[in-house]
Amino acid sequence: MKILYSRVSTAEQNAERQIQNSESFDYVFVDKCSGLIPLWERPRGKELKKLIDQGKLKQITVHSIDRFGRDTVSVIQVWKELTELGIVVECRNPNLRNIDENGKPDMFSELMISILSTMASFEKQMIKERQMEGVRIAKAKGIYTGRAVNTKETSEKFMSKPKNKKIAEYLSSGYPMSEIVSIMKCSYSTVLKVKNSKPINIPN
């Protein structure tokens, strides 16, 4: 079975660009959630895992490798896991493939995946540093109005927000974190922060 897999961050985003030329695939799976959520915990990711466990999945194609995760570790982990299982992974942009036509690991693609994932993480860090620099400049000019850098919002204030209260209700009702992310249109880290906030009685 061949699956074309796509992920967009929010329900409002369109995955059309990622799933073009899908005629040759058995199914097209689209997840609409944060890339911080591990692949196998996403709604469609769980379906992929089920097909793998049943021995039905032979190939996964993605538009770009960052559809698997937002950081180097998670991307490489998924890539290696699928390679060890003998499942072909094709990336369209850039053109990479974990297993060649002879059924052997493609060493060039392994190297490229590592380099590209590292570059993506580096770019993310650079963006964060530029944002912090912008805050410092704004503070120096006396025009910064946001929360002071390196200060923490109290748990009580964080949990007093209506959206976070609703997230807490879903957690208390036993909803999976990935499902709450989809329902509330929020990040995985926000749900995790609500779960870890005190005082709040949320089952593990």
Image (cartoon, grey):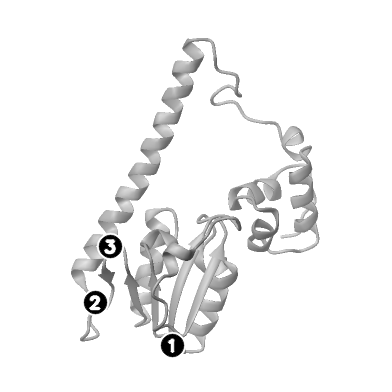
Front in this rendered view, residue 59 or 92: 92
Please determine whether, in this image, residue 58 is positioned above or below residue 64: below
Q: Position of residue 35 (x, y in %)?
A: 50, 56
Q: Position of residue 167 (x, y in %)?
A: 74, 51
Whole-number angstrom distance, CA of label 1 to CA of label 3: 23 Å
Residue located at (32% from left, 67% from top): 92
- Of the residues under marks 2 and 1, which one precedes in the sequence? 1
Which residue position is annotated with label 3?
Answer: 94
Q: Quadrant of residue 176?
A: bottom right
Labelled disc at residue 1 = 1
- SS assignment at label 3: loop
Residue located at (52% from left, 54% from top): 36
Q: Quadrant of residue 59?
A: bottom left
Quadrant showing the C terminus: bottom right
Can the viewer see residue 68? no
Labelled disc at residue 50 = none
For label 2, count other residues whose C-alpha is less than 10 Å away and answer few (under 14), some (14-19) or many (20+): some
Front in this rendered view, residue 200 or 143: 143
Labelled disc at residue 105 = 2
Asked if labels 1 and 2 touch by Cβ distance under 8 angstroms, the answer is no
Q: Position of residue 12 (x, y in %)?
A: 59, 55
- Of the residues under marks 1 and 3, which one precedes in the sequence? 1
Residue type at mark 3 is Pro
Front in this rendered view, residue 72 or 42: 42
Residue type at mark 2 is Pro
- Of the residues under marks 3 and 2, which one precedes in the sequence? 3
- SS assignment at label 2: loop
